Image (cartoon, grey):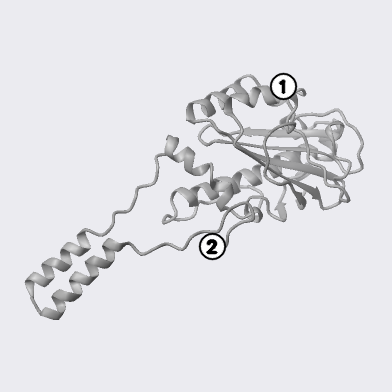
Amino acid sequence: MAPGPYGDAWAAPQEAPRGRRARAWAAVCLVLGVGLIGGAVAGSAINHKPGTVPPPVNGSVEAFAAVRQVWRNTPVDTLFPPTVSAKGAGPGGADRTWSRIGVAAPAGCAAAFDPLLQQVLAPAGCSKLLRATYVDSTSTTVTTVGLLVTAAESPTMRGLSSRWSSQHLGDRTDLLPRPVAFPGTAAASFGARQRGSWDVQVAADLPFVVYAVTGFADGRAVDPQPADKATKPGATSVPAQAGLGYDATGLASAVDDRLHAAVTTLLRPPGGTTPARPGAPR
């Protein structure tokens, strides 16, 4: 597999010395024609191959440590595809397509969130923050989607996820992630005042927080509304009418799906593929 732009080149796997010794013994026995003894030695070689290390248990310290490295081993185009499409994912069941216009360098979390959101996320720590910004097919809306790789273990992530949902923190307009603007693009004017809708997804079983924040490409300011409210049938706010909530949820879910697929591949590479969630953007 080719290394992604975030990670280091992979070293070619080395043949296990113990496996070579086993095959050498089997070859000697065959040359000497020792019959049953040769068969016994060969059988012993087979039964004593280097053991396969079992995958770490989900939610364990070992699993969390492994999956924190997924961003290094996964190409950026896999986590943040150049184009994301979703059928029926817009207002009135309209199809949506977003094109990537910029990828920020991996960074820390300073100034990436509003101060109170930074405070809420602080117990989880910040191992790395990855972000990309997209524009919709009409160049009307721009969306920054982010992946926060936390430093927390399973109990902290379960607690943060529970608090986020039980206290409805995703509805508070003082707990917003901040966008990433890219000069010379449709997102050149995408700043804090342009945020129109957002979606924050806190994983309970993985050290990740995925989020998206969206606004108008022309730089107009708007009263923000959380995505779950801006996507409700009959919603009449500006973010709802413009489909900003659909942009936020669609892109956050798309990246979250790709992240989970990458984690599955990392932890259980010999297994089958994990199917995408029904109706998920592709």
Left or right: residue 96 versus residue 277 is: right
Left or right: residue 14 versus residue 44 is: right
The dot on residue 189 is: none
Dot 2: what SS? loop
Q: CA distance from mark 1 to mark 2?
A: 41 Å
- The residue carrying mark 2 is 1
Q: Of marks 1 and 2, which one's residue comes earlier in the chain?
A: 2
Quadrant containing the N terminus is: bottom right
Please tell me in which quadrant of the rendered image residue 166 appears: top right
Please indicate, yes or no, whether residue 193 appears anywhere in the rendered image.
yes
Q: Is residue 108 above or below residue 282?
A: above
- Crowding near the residue tagged with mark 1, few <14, some 14–19, many ≥20 C-alpha atoms within 10 Å: few
Residue at the image position 61 percent from the left and 33 percent from the top: 126
Dot 1: what SS? helix
Where residue 149 sits: x, y (%)?
59, 38
Q: Is residue 279 above or below residue 227?
A: below
- Residue at the farthest top position: 167
Residue at the image position 78 percent from the left and 38 percent from the top: 179
- Report the front residue among 201 and 42: 42
- The residue carrying mark 1 is 116
Left or right: residue 147 versus residue 11 is: right
Residue at the image position 55 percent from the left and 59 percent from the top: 9
Left or right: residue 241 versus residue 257 is: right
Q: Is residue 228 above or below residue 52?
A: above
* Kind of residue sitting beneath label 2: Met
Where residue 116 sits: x, y (%)?
72, 21
- Report the front residue among 99 and 238: 99
Please indicate, yes or no, whether residue 233 appears anywhere in the rendered image.
no
